[in-house]
Image: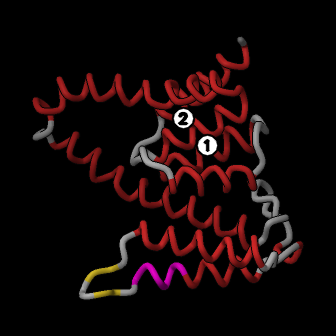
Amino acid sequence: MMELLTLFFTFFKIGLFTIGGGYAMLPMVEREIVDKLGWITQEQLLDYIGVAECTPGPFAVNTATFVGNAMGGVWGGIVATVGVCLPSFIVILVLAALLEKFMEKKPVQGFFYGVRPVVCGLIAASCVSIALGLVFPELDLTYFGSLSSSFNWMNLLLIGAFFGISFVRVRGKTLHPLWILLLSAVVGIVLFGVLKL
């Protein structure tokens, strides 16, 4: 029971202080779940992020569900999901009542202008952290150990390739993220499942 309560309050705190969506939540999840509590490893978090990306539904909810399930089974998944969703539900109810009245106020507009760059920074920090974890799998991101400890050139090549593919234009439009995910799944199956690189 205590484990479920800890799971709930941990994800409630993450949901409460996450502004900007699921990707902005990643640094907080990494700090709380991986570094502070040690519930999962950095590699497991990367796996959950990959699965959360590929499954329907909000990214933050999917990640909370997978981590909660890993910690406490089905009930852990439910508790973590409710924990991460409840703050948004409460805040949206309160904001819906108040925001329309205060939206034109300069301090409120200033708040939103100030938060936007921070959200971009948090998302960028998550991207860098994930990329470093993939390219240098043995690197302790908590203490920024020696980068020469390990190096996965294949992951670096794949990151660069799929980053480039995301800018490819077909008939004047960039590729839909779904096609990029499906292509990456096929490449992963071939390289790491069939060829076992």
* Magenta-drawn stretch contains 83: no
Q: Residue at x 72, y 13 (%)?
A: 2
**Residue 114: x, y in percent?**
33, 52
State the image quarter where residue 11 is shown: top right
Q: CA distance from mark 1 to mark 2?
A: 7 Å
Q: Residue at x 35, y 22 (%)?
A: 90
Which residue in the protein does label 2 denote? Answer: 14
**Residue 59: x, y in percent?**
47, 47
* Magenta-drawn stretch contains 165: yes
Looking at the image, is 16 positioned above or below residue 5?
below
Q: Is residue 194 left or right of residue 84?
A: right
In primary-sequence order, the first of circles 1 and 2 is 2
Which residue in the protein does label 1 denote? Answer: 29
| Other-residue count near label 1 (Cα within 10 Å), few / some / many at <14 / 14–19 / ≥20 | many
Looking at the image, is 139 positioned above or below residue 165?
above
| Magenta residues (range) | 162-167
Amino acid at circle 2: Ile
**Residue 107: x, y in percent?**
22, 41
Q: Main secondary structure of the magenta part?
A: helix
State the image quarter where residue 131 is shown: bottom right
Q: Is residue 54 left or right of residue 44?
A: left
Amino acid at circle 1: Val
